[in-house]
Amino acid sequence: MPRFMASLLALLILAGPAMAQEAPPKDQPKEKAAAKTTRRPRPAHADTGKTFMGREIADVMSYLGADWLVRPEREQEEQPEAMLDALKIKPGDTVADIGAGVGYTSARISKRVGPKGTVLATDVQPQMIKMLRDNMKTMGITNVKAIACTPTETGLPDNAVDLAILIDVYHECSDPVATLKGIRKALKPGGRLVLVEFRAEDPDVPIKPEHKMTVAQVKKEIEPQGFAFKELHDFLPWQHIIIFEKPTKEKTDAPKGAEPAPK
């Protein structure tokens, strides 16, 4: 990975808390973002035309566009520190940053979980994993563990994760059901699943439609996989923060007192 990119990432992460913006009061309108269109780099593979529950599955962003993940404008467009503030991550937590890329968010989370916590940073592209490891080494971060995953295997340990976060990633998962099952298996009872997605309800969000999701679509896809909707934050300029929870107790297939099914 080019040294200038690692240095830029380190600068952005270290400056993050000072550059974070507070959530706007509910009685005040959000400021309009810059008029220019935010363009994602080219995909990692050709368009497959796959759909899931009525939406197009977007292509995975290629590692060749990794510098887009650390663009300076991201501070203003996505307010990463304010987003993480809303999640109330605690020291000692184990957080899975799924689709972590070069570690832009993983490094920020590492400061919040502290030396007794762990960040499990996963990605499907080996090249991204290498860049992530290089970046963590450059920044002297030791509590981020890079994990190579696949579209069907998360690579996460069972019942070990307090919070799993996917930032502009879920809409690119080529096998959403397998991904969600793997995340659910990795979460502790009561653990949280967080999706940060560009708002498809807002035509002014300058992102291609396949890279945006509505809250209704997210709920439609996530809840059938055994997650309970918990809360929604919409103070970011362009994105939803949608939080689900793994139930503390598993639901039974039959109601209490029902006769067992015949064998």
Image (tube, helix red, strand yellow):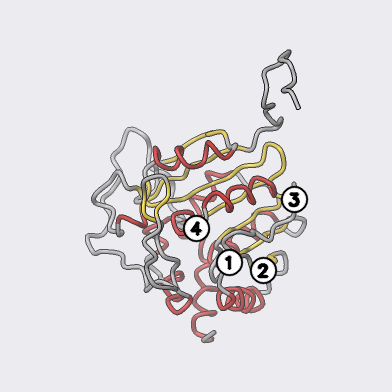
Q: From the viewer's perspective, tell me whether residue 38 is left or right of residue 89.
A: left
Mark 1 neighbour class, 10 Å CA radius: few under 14, some 14 to 19, many 20 or more: many
Amino acid type assigned to the residue bearing label 2 in the image: Ala
Instruction: Tell me the distance, in whole angstroms, between the alpha carbons under discs 3 and 2.
Output: 17 Å
Residue drawn 39% across the image and 65% down it: 48
Q: Position of residue 96 (x, y in %)?
A: 64, 55
Q: Nearer the viewer, mark 4 or mark 2?
A: 4
Task: Please tell me which of labels 4 and 2 falls first in the chain.
Answer: 2
Q: Splitting the image into 4 quarters, where does residue 109 fall?
A: bottom right
- Dot placed on the residue nearer the N-terminal end, 3 or 1: 1
* Disc 1 target residue: 123
Whether residues under marks 3 and 2 lie with C-beta atoms below 8 angstroms apart, the answer is: no
Characterize the local packing of mark 3: few (<14), some (14-19) or many (20 or more) Cα atoms within 10 angstroms.
Answer: few
Residue 257, image x, y percentages: 73, 13
Q: Are marks 3 and 4 in contact (CB under 8 Å)?
A: no
- Vertical arrangement, residue 26 with respect to residue 30, above or below: above
- Per the image, the residue denoted by label 3 is 158
Q: Which of marks 1 and 2 is in front?
A: 1
Marks 4 and 1: CB-CB under 8 Å?
Answer: no
Disc 4/disc 1 C-alpha distance (Å): 11 Å
* CA distance separating discs 3 and 1: 18 Å
* Marked residue nearer the N-terminal end (4 or 1): 1
For residue 173, the mark is: 4
Which tag, 3 or 4, sits closer to the chain's start? 3
Between 19 and 128, the one lying in front of the other is 128
Q: Which amino acid does label 3 sit on?
A: Asp
Q: How far apart are marks 1 and 2 (CA)?
A: 8 Å
Residue at which label 2 appears: 146
